[in-house]
């Protein structure tokens, strides 16, 4: 079954979540309202809400409960993107102007804060403290991931473990928690909750590594921004790590080129090519595939349902996507 | 009774809260840990926790419950200060280097996010959704206040109502909520909760107006930063609003002077003097006193206890303080 068909199956419930997202970010302030609406309109795959819905099918599925877990998860993701764009000094996201470029960094900071606050407010629907603990923990780990990214910027000597821990915190955990909370809110068995968490974590890792690969091999049209952005901003991801680890010449090239004053304006196509020729792309795809395999394994331990096959489809799509 | 004596009465419980604050901001990351610890060590009056404790005395006082409400309130306050320093581009706070000056704006942003997250995490101790709703609403209103401050910056034509709504959101609400939640966590009567909220709101308004007055009349030593900082950053507060409303000459002076490229470096002593001579200081003190009076009135409707006299003392101290 194709991805679009899976989405179609949940069309009406995704629409309910979309409406709830819109209602939730209503603000009594024009700038905030406009900034938040722009973020919503920019779209995105709503992958976290979809994971919530699919996971909940392993328990007692009730969209009126579930929307209150899907919305905060998507909002936390959105808020982190806004704050991320400040860090990355990014002017474009998905081909559109970012909040920080349309207004400024200060507006981006408070728009992010506002959306975080709305995420917390929405989740107060649930009285189970465990849900709040899992959500706030996910927020905290994401902050740690972001601070680590700042700390590790332009550090060309970091090891693979540091990279993997960072993407776990930045990306994989929120996807893991989306699967876990969908199951928890639907009162599925503990073991199912754990299995779905494992699935989400491994899908998230595969997703981020694929993202990092695409930043090297994607076209500007596919990415909605020029390729090599990570490297230009000093973010060392797996393909570059591999290349620099196996070829000191590349390491020197990267260090020298990015030691210039305006690394954002320089032509880094020679570095991109060197990384591509080092085998770093193939290696990264292999690691991504290993996580994907672990995600499949986590699924195997779950009851055989059609949602299980959907989860497998989405995982494959995410891990193997070409843009 | 003097303020120090009131604090002495709660010494052991304030110590418990202080320890809980320290434990709460423990982070698995050096930068975050150092930044958060520095914030804690910088001190402050811990006025919000003290209000929680005093308010709880009108119900069933239990410090082991109360610390879980005092800590998130203080953390939300601290996080807002960190993000505030980014907005104000402030290098000093209470005479110490700010996070954004010691590290950078990006670290300040994520330190703030982290502390917000910790506030949410700590409050999960309570299962009463009302507590979470009140807390998240306070966070949201503070964001609105901050965004309004950005919007209103350098807007010399804003009216008094806009100023009052902004300081309500930025300052008064969190103090109101501290009093309310102390009473709520201690299961005090609804009417007492409402009375304490009213008290806190009016104290908070008086507090912020006094703060804004001190920015004009305080010495650098008293303020821990040079006087006139608000004006220099384009933040229009009550004394300046009054002056510009009553004297078009002052309005022109302010506009012209701050239209220069580097308003932070110019000598604004002539503007400060003009505001002082306009009667804006006396007017602002009068408004602050009116709020203080309303705070006293809210107290009068509460049962006669020694904590009521303490609250009155603290309100007077806060509203009438000279630095």
Image (cartoon, coloured by chain):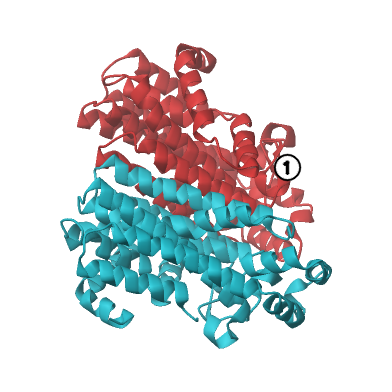
Chain colours: A cyan, B red
Q: Secondary structure at mark 1?
A: loop
Residue at screen point 24% across, 27% down: B187
Q: Residues within 10 Å of mark 1 (few under 14, many from 20)?
A: some
Front-most of residues A243 and B151: A243
Asked whether residue A73 appears in the rendered view, the answer is no
**Is residue B270 at least partly visible in the picture?**
yes
Instruction: Give the percent coordinates (x, y) of residue B127.
Output: 26, 37
Q: How many marks?
A: 1
B5 is higher (above) or lower (below) than B289? above
Q: Nearer the viewer, residue A310 or B276?
A: A310
Position in image of residue A259 (x %, y %): 82, 66
Q: Is residue A148 above or below residue B290?
A: below
A35 lies left or right of B269: left
Left or right: where B158 falls relative to A9: right
Q: What chain does badge 1 belong to? A: B
The foreground one among B188 and B311 is B188
Q: In the image shown, does B250 or A162 lie closer to the viewer? A: A162
Q: Is residue A102 above or below residue B21?
A: below
Where does the image place residue B153, in percent across and percent down from the top left?
58, 60
Q: Residue at x 18, y 56 (%)?
A: A59
Residue A110 screen position, x and y as percent: 50, 58
Which residue shows up at 76% across the image and 61% down it?
A: B262
Determine the residue positioned at 71% across, 52% down. Answer: B271
Q: In which quarter of the view is residue B39 placed?
A: top right
On screen, residue B50 versus residue A22, left or right, reads: right
The quadrant of the image that shows the C terminus of chain B is top right
A72 up-or-down from B35: above or below: below
The residue tagged 1 is B226
């Amino acid at each position: 079954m194709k991805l679009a068909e899976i989405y179609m199956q949940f069309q009406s419930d995704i629409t309910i979540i979309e409406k709830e997202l819109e209602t939730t970010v209503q603000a009594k302030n024009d700038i905030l309202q406009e900034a938040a609406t722009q973020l919503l309109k920019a779209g995105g795959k709503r992958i976290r809400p979809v994971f919530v819905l699919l996971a909940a099918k392993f328990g007692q599925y009730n969209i009126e409960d579930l929307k209150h877990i899907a919305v905060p998860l998507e909002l936390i993701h959105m808020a982190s993107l806004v704050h991320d764009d400040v860090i990355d000094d990014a002017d474009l996201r998905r081909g559109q102007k970012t909040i920080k470029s349309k207004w400024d960094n200060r507006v981006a900071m408070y728009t992010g804060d506002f959306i975080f606050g709305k995420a917390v407010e929405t989740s107060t629907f649930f009285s189970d403290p465990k849900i709040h603990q899992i959500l706030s923990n996910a927020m905290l780990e994401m902050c740690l991931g972001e601070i680590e990214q700042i700390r590790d910027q332009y550090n060309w000597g970091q090891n693979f473990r540091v990279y993997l821990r960072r993407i776990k915190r930045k990306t994989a955990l929120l996807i893991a928690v989306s699967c876990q909370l969908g199951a928890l809110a639907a009162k599925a068995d503990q073991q199912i909750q754990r299995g779905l968490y494992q699935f989400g974590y491994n899908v998230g890792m595969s997703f981020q590594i694929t993202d990092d690969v695409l930043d090297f091999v994607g076209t500007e049209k596919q990415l909605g921004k020029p390729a090599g952005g990570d490297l230009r901003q000093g973010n060392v991801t797996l393909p570059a790590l591999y290349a620099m680890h196996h070829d000191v010449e590349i390491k020197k090239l990267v260090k020298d080129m990015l030691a210039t004053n305006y690394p954002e304006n320089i032509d880094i196509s020679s570095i991109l090519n060197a990384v591509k020729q080092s085998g770093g792309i193939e290696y990264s795809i292999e690691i991504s595939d290993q996580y994907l395999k672990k995600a499949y394994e986590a699924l195997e331990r779950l009851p055989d349902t059609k949602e299980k096959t959907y989860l497998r489809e989405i995982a494959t799509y995410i891990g193997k996507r070409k843009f």
